[in-house]
Amino acid sequence: MARDRSPERDKAREIWLESGGKMTAKQVAEAVGGVKPEQVRKWKSLDSWAAALEAQKPPRKRGGQPGNKNAVGAGPPTGNRNAETHGAYSAVRMEDLTTEQRVYIQKITLDTKKNMLAELQLLIAKEFDLQNKIAKLESAESGSLFIDRVVEVQTPKGQERLNQQLEKLASLQAEEEALRWDMDVQQGKPPTKQQQKRLESLQREIAALQDTTGDRARELEKAAYNTATRTVIQASAFDRTMKLEAELNRIHGRIIKLLDSIKGYELESRRVRLEERKYNLAKQKLSGAFDIDPETGEINDEQDDFDAELEA
């Protein structure tokens, strides 16, 4: 028939867990009373106290933990772009632009005619720039090659050695913890010379591995890839000229389209102005009061504030 479970066994476990795992076997035995440290150590192994302690800890969340003040007064300054990749979705501030770019943006108005003129000027400037580049290519020496792009194939740096060192570090730390536990359960007896010598040896090895793995991890973080192959793609002067001429034709098409838009805008403005003049003339006929230009003797149908003068 199986023996009943000792109540001291559960009591010892509860006391150790409440201490957060900081009490030694001797201290737990004294707190329970009538139990030897060796028995406490056996209970700890059989009942998996360490796993229970880890399970009762609250799950860690990403980022800083509650009460953590490591980053107080630190952090990146406003506008920091350390985490930026390609930057397609980054927030843009006026302070990030050059002085010329800010001046250009501030000069933009809601005047359609001015905006069309500014766009036309930029397109013509782009057209001249493309023409200059084509002229340089046409005067280049025969057989000249130009670098279009460079393609690199990169492979991750090997981390097998680092992983082996990390595994050895974890093993040594576990051995150190077990040795310390053995030294705690000796009922007040001082540790043996062999135990003390082994503990000092473990501490030296752990410290050395911590330094090595830390330096190695930082090194791999800075240069995490090796360049396996590097391909340089070149183009002839003829190929580049063809691409530039294609872009020149596209820009020229945009200029023609914009000129048509400007012409349409001018015609529409004249039509609107003519309707306004007809409207002003009709108002004067209805009121019977005509605004006569003293120089020409004709009716002035372009006076927008004629109603204001009548009211005055």
Image (cartoon, rainbow, N blue to C red):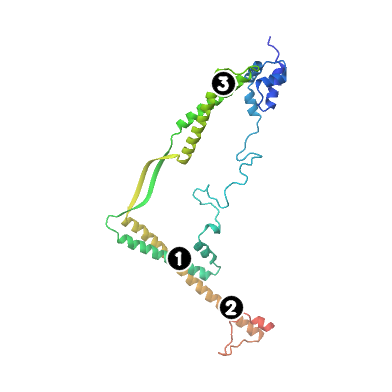
Kindly identify which residue carries mark 1. Answer: 122
Q: Between residues 239 and 84, which one lies in front from this camera angle?
A: 84
Q: Residue at x 49, y 38 (%)?
A: 218
The mark lying in front, picked from 2 and 1, is 1
SS at mark 2 in the image = helix
Q: From what the image shows, is residue 172 above or below residue 86?
A: above
* Of the image marks 3 and 1, the number of the one nearer the N terminus: 1
Q: Residue at x 45, y 69 (%)?
A: 259
Q: Which quadrant does the C terminus fall into?
A: bottom right
Q: Could you say where residue 2 lies in the image, as x and y percent from the top left?
A: 68, 11
Viewer-proximal residue, 72 or 4?
72
Alpha carbon separation for disc pair 2 and 1: 34 Å
Q: Residue at x 34, y 61 (%)?
A: 134
Q: Quadrant of residue 46?
A: top right
Circle 1 SS class:
helix
Quadrant of residue 1 within the rendered picture: top right
Q: Residues within 10 Å of mark 3 (few under 14, many from 20)?
A: some
Q: Which mark is residue 196?
A: 3
Could you tell me residue 179's position as x and y percent?
58, 21
